Structures are given as C-alpha cells and as structure tokens.
Image (cartoon, rainbow, N blue to C red):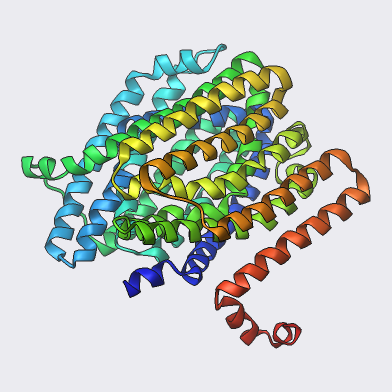
Amino acid sequence: MISEKKESSYGHILKYTSLFGGIQGLNMLIGLVRNKLVAIILGPQGMGLISLFNTSVKLISDSTNLGLSMSAVKNLSEAYESGDEERLKHMMVVIRMWSLLTALVGVFFAFALSPLLNNWTFNWGDHTLHFVLLSPIVGMMAITGGEMAILKATRHLRRLAVISVFNVLLALFTSVPIYYLMGERGIVPSLVVIALSQMLLTIYQSFRLYPYRIQFSRQGLSDGMDMVRLGIAFVLAGVMGSGADFIIRSFLNNVASLDEVGLYNAGYMMTMVYAGMVFSAMETDYFPRLSAVNNDSDLCRLTVNRQIEVSLLLIAPMLVAFIVAIPILLPLLYSRQFLPAIGMVQVMSLALYFRALKLPLSYIPLAKGDSWSYLFLEMLYDILIVVMVIVLFRSYGLLGAGIAITATGILEYGLLLIYTRVKYAYCPSREVLICSLIQIPIGFAAYLTVITLHGWMCWLVGGVLFAISLYFSIRILQQKTSMWKKLTSRFPFLRRKE
C-alpha cells in the first residue's frame, strides 16, 4: 500500500511526465528541423504525399500486428514483476515468435492490397508500385514493436530514451539528403530507409540485453493466445483510428487537393504531436501504475485524478503561449506556404485541454482488462471525428476541420466521463474541477484574443493570460510537490523570492 501511494504521488507523476516530456521535446526540436527542411524541399504537395503513404502503411500495420506492442507489455510486465527469470525468457521467445509471424502476414497483405490502396487513396496516377515497395515497412514495424514492448516491460527507460532520440536523428540524416537529391521520387525510398534504421537500432539495444532466441512450436503459439486475444481489441481500435485518418485525408485529397492534405497534416502534427508532448509519459509510466491498482477503486480514482491534474497544469501555460505564437511558429517550423493552416491550428489547440482530461480516463478500461469497453469508446470517437470533419470542412474549409476536432474532443470527454462514472464509479476530484475551471477558460480567452485583437494588443493580452496560467500552475504544483523546494535549494535567488 505504501508503494502504491508513492507511485500515485504528485512528485512521481511530475517527475516522469517531465522526463518523458523533455525527451519528447528534444525529439520535437530535431523533428522540427527535419520538417522544416522537408517542407522547403517538397512543399505542401510533397508533405501531403508523405502523409497519404504513412497513413496507408499504418492502416495495414494496425490491421495485422495483433496489438502485440501493447498487450505484450502487460504480459511481460507480469513475468518481470514476479521475478521469474525462466518465465520472462520464455515470454520473450513467445513474443518474438508472434512478432515475426505478424511481420510476415503484414508484408503479404500490404503487397496484395497495393492495387486497392492505390484506388482508395488517389484519383490521379498509378501508385500501385509505390505501395508494393512500401510493404516491407509493415514487417519492420511489427518487429520493432515487439522489441520495444520487451524494453518497456523490463523498465529500460534510459535505452528507450536513447532509441527515441536516435530515431529522429536517423530520420533527419537519411531523409533530407534523399529528398534533396531525388525530390518527390525519394519519398518511398526515404520511408523504407527510416523504418529499416529504426528497426535495426531497436533490435540492437534489445538484443544486447536479451539475446535473440526464437523457437516455433505449438506451445509457443498456445502461450501467446492470451496476449493475442487481449490485443484483438487494440487491433480493431487501431484499424478504426487509422481508418478514420485514412478517410479524412482521402476525403480532403478528393474533395479539395493534395495541398489541402499537406496543410491539414502540418496543422495536425503541430497541434496533436508537438504541443501534446506532455502526454508522452502516459503509456510508459502511467499505464503500468494504473494497472497495478486497478482492483482498488479508491487508489484507481486517486491515480487517475492526480494524473489529470498534473497533465493539465503542465500543458495549460504551454497552450496559451502556443495559441498566441502560432503565426510566428508555423512559417518558422514549416514555410510561409503553410500560413493558410493558422486558423485551424489555433482552434484545434483548444482540443488539447480536453485531451489532458480524457486520456487518463481512457486507460481505465485497459488497466481493468476491459478491452471491449476501450474498443467501443475508440469507435465512438472515430465515427464522431470523421463525420464532424467532413461536415464542417465542407462549410468552413480548414478552419472547419479544426473546429471539428475540438468539438469532437469536448463531446468525447463528456461521453467518457459518463461512461466511466456508470461502469467504474469514477468521478473527478475537487482539485481536477478547480484546475479545469481556472485553466480552460484562460485557454478560450487566449483564442478569443488572437481572433479579435491584432498587433501589440494581441501580444500584450496574450502575455498577461500566459502569466496568469503559469502562475496558477506553479502555485498549485508548489503546494503539492517537493520539487519546488529541490529547485530553490539549487537556485538561491528563487528561495529569496518565496
């Protein structure tokens, strides 16, 4: 019980959220350099083409990987926590066997479905050969996912951090020269090279710790069935999520243009990926902690509420600054060709407030092994996002797509709150309500500021709102954790101001 309470502490959550958020921030900076160079070389049309290929490959990968990258973590963690070395080694053999099987199946399906992917994705040209050449990526992703699951379950966080940083560095130093020399013709070779380098780096780190052993047997297939059954819901959820992305991008490509796909993808990447780096610790740290206390309703609720509170307090000031600075950040990170996406990015940023509230809730069904509830909730979101984007894009263009994503986030959080209340007796704490009532209105005020004020007035009011949001976040975290005391012990000038 003491250990569980320690794992639920604000200090622990803040420490690991900051750690993985910092790693994600470093990755983001490297990725920004890459995206900037790629955007200059290829422009919106090339970025749109990359987006369509990546979305298609991810759809096939999510359809064939049996959810091993998530379900394997749960199974391996149990073996790791029990201290049974023989069982742990056996489970690694099982996972590697299943990863190789899913890799082979994935490559086959990607190859066989290439003509269909071409017809569904493009209304111009024949890109069947491109999809054929991209099919090995699906197999590489399956093998990489299995080895990453082993490293996560055995708590090798430092190696995961090294892999994460080197992956983006490899993507930078391999793709940019290829695009520079070959232009759009280099997109397919670049994607294959990136996937190959990431797979080799991951298996190198994993094999150093746990040498490769594989043995195909009926017993291995049987032992992996529980893991596979748990992963089926992840597969279906992943297929629906990738399918929703696929439908949205294909809709934009057919109704508007490939340029619109590139603008949408750049805006989505800026908002949901770059600004969402605070959420990077969820799967690695929060999910195992929540799983450990899932049978204790009070501790489960405490863990969820504290994760929500810390996530919201950390991301809220960033979002205010992000909303105000987007007119500078977008051309800086991409190019001036992407300026039409500014309105979409600004309104979409508001969705991240509700993402901070809903992500910890969405892990409750998984921690309790209720994978079908997770599947139902994911399906609901995917249906909502596709319908909302299609309807509002037709009326308001890219701005409508941004409004759709934010509106869907609000609706999803409301439905998730009701569902978890009824099924798991979850209710938000007083602290979560207070943080929400303070920070979310400040975010909406920042958005109103950027659409109604201009020039120095916009920057002045935006700066004041940022200062207010930052003050409340620091004040609350200062009261709840010892990290502020540790910081002031290192920097005396901060201690004097207290």
Position in image of residue 33 (x %, y %): 65, 50
**Can I make out residue 96 in this image?**
yes
**Can I make out residue 135 in this image?**
no
Q: Quadrant of the N terminus?
A: bottom left
Q: Quadrant of the C terminus?
A: bottom right
Quarter of image, res 330 = top right
As drawn, the residue found furthest toward the right would be 456
72 lies above or below 374: below
Compare residues 140 and 269 and report the one nearer the observer.
269
Total numbered labels placed on residues in the image: 0
Position in image of residue 314 (x %, y %): 61, 60
As drawn, the residue found furthest toward the left would be 218
Position in image of residue 89 (x %, y %): 16, 58
* Residue under the image location 62 percent in, 60 percent down: 313
Quarter of image, res 60 = top left
* Residue under the image location 39 percent in, 23 percent down: 132
Q: Along the horizontal axis of the image, is 130 left or right of 341?
A: left
298 lies above or below 228: below
Position in image of residue 490 (x %, y %): 63, 85
* Residue under the image location 49 percent in, 42 percent down: 417
Q: Along the horizontal axis of the image, is 438 left or right of 121?
A: right
73 lies above or below 370: below
Compare residues 414 and 329 and report the one nearer the observer.
414
* Residue under the image location 49 percent in, 57 percent down: 305
322 lies above or below 375: below
